[in-house]
Image (cartoon, rainbow, N blue to C red):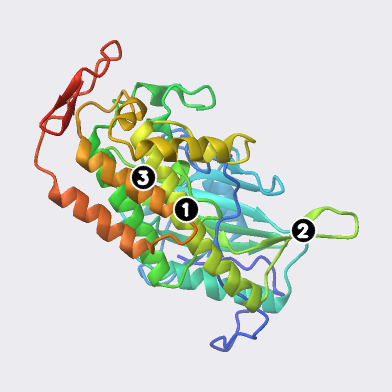
Amino acid sequence: MGICWGSPDFPTPSFRPSFPHDIDLTMSSSSDPASSPIANSCASSLDGAVLSNPSSSHEQLRVFRYAELKAMTKNFSSALGETHFDGMDIVHCGWIEAGAVVMKTAVKVIEYPRKPSRLQRSIMRAKVESYGSLHHPNVARSLGYCLKGRKLLLVYEIPRNHFSLEDLLYKGAPDIVDKGKAAALPLPWDRRLQIAVDATKGLSYLSMMNHAFPRYFQASYVLLDKLYAVKIAPFNLLVTESSDSAGRKSKVIVGIETGNLLATERRRQAVNDLGVILLELLTGLALGRNRWSPEYGSRIEWIKTRVLDSDKIVSLMDSNMGSYPLDSALEVAQLAVYCLGKVPPTLTQVEEKLRQIKGSEISFPTSPRSPEIVFSGQIGGLVQP
């Protein structure tokens, strides 16, 4: 598992980096909220394109050669999705052998406007290897990376048969490429709450390990396997936007002062985005991916004013959810609104509150609601279809 330096002028540093003060090492995604990085599926196999993984260590990233990644992805022909920051970040599907197991991978290709300097390459390598040393059941595992010219390629393991939370919440939406995913069963209340807990656990872990988050965290970054186990999808090195003399946006590695401010802002933004996901889990409405819409802010505010009302929230709840405890739904709604406030809670506090809500619930049936049946009443705090 590791990194690929694409040419002889990418020497492996002979020192343990003590980083200059003008270099930031925060990790984040560069995608915008309209992206769905690996929400689409690829073929179950790529003929002749399964790469063997000789690494026996789970603590070191593999140093991939660029030619290996071309073979894994059949010359980068199987796109999983795209992140639209300068239109340059693309995620491809690949397969790699690990002993007797063939793992599905996401290969994220990030292209910078200029070739990084030696120092920048060393910094990038150290940061990616730092992320690769992290292990958490709710965070996508890094397998390795490759630096080739202006391109940084990051390799992650993803579930073999995966959905994104976006697939399940907005099934049948016209922009979901894989229409087979539209046949997925509705998510019942207890499963939605567990997904919220697990996604928050992954983000909270990254926060505790001093790693930042996707630039905008949204439902398409939450991957689910067939048992609905949660994995948060890929990240890349923190970059920021700047303008050259022609007014074009470019990617640069930010300085440490700006980077620290950005990292703090990213943590706050991650909590805000988590609040939006909680609203999406409650309502089934596509909110986060419409962030750039002129109506986004007013729509969020409109929902916030209604989800805290025990009478109005019922009309907003996802009709595909089935039965749910109204008291718990109101608590999740209150937490979502708190996350969207100017002084939001920490991720640890959000995780603790979600665990508390889940732990306080009694077992109840969650049979899916028939689409032609409307809300008919509330019995003992349980909203019935």
Front residue of this view, candidates 142 and 102: 142
Instruction: State the image quarter where residue 188 is shown.
Output: top left
**Label 2 amino acid?**
Pro
Label 2 sits on residue: 113
Q: Quadrant of the N terminus?
A: bottom left
Q: Which residue is mark 1?
A: 272
* Mark found first going from the N terminus, 3 or 1: 3
Q: In the rendered image, is residue 78 in sight?
A: no
Question: Residue 250's x, y, as percent?
Answer: 76, 57
What residue is at 46 percent from the left and 62 percent from the top?
A: 343
What residue did someone put label 3 on?
Answer: 159
In 3D space, how far apart are the residues under numbered discs 3 and 1 (Cα atoms)? Answer: 27 Å
Residue 311 at what x, y percent from top left?
29, 30
In the image, taking residue 6 as reference, residue 190 lies left or right, namely: left
Label 2: how many Cα within 10 Å (few below 14, some 14–19, many 20+): few
Q: Is residue 333 left or right of residue 19?
A: left
Which numbered disc, 3 or 2, marks the residue closer to the eye?
2
Which is closer to the viewer, label 1 or label 2? 1
The amino acid sitting under disc 3 is: Pro
The x, y position of residue 14, in whole percent, is 58, 88
Give the residue drawn at x 48%, y 23%.
173
> Regarding mark 2 in the picture, which secondary structure is present there?
loop
Q: Is residue 272 above or below residue 378?
A: below
Q: What's under tag 1, amino acid-wise?
A: Asn
Q: CA distance from mark 3 to mark 2?
A: 32 Å
Q: Which mark is residue 206?
A: none
Quadrant (top left, top right, bottom left, bottom right) of the C terminus: top left
Is disc 3 placed on a helix, strand or loop? loop
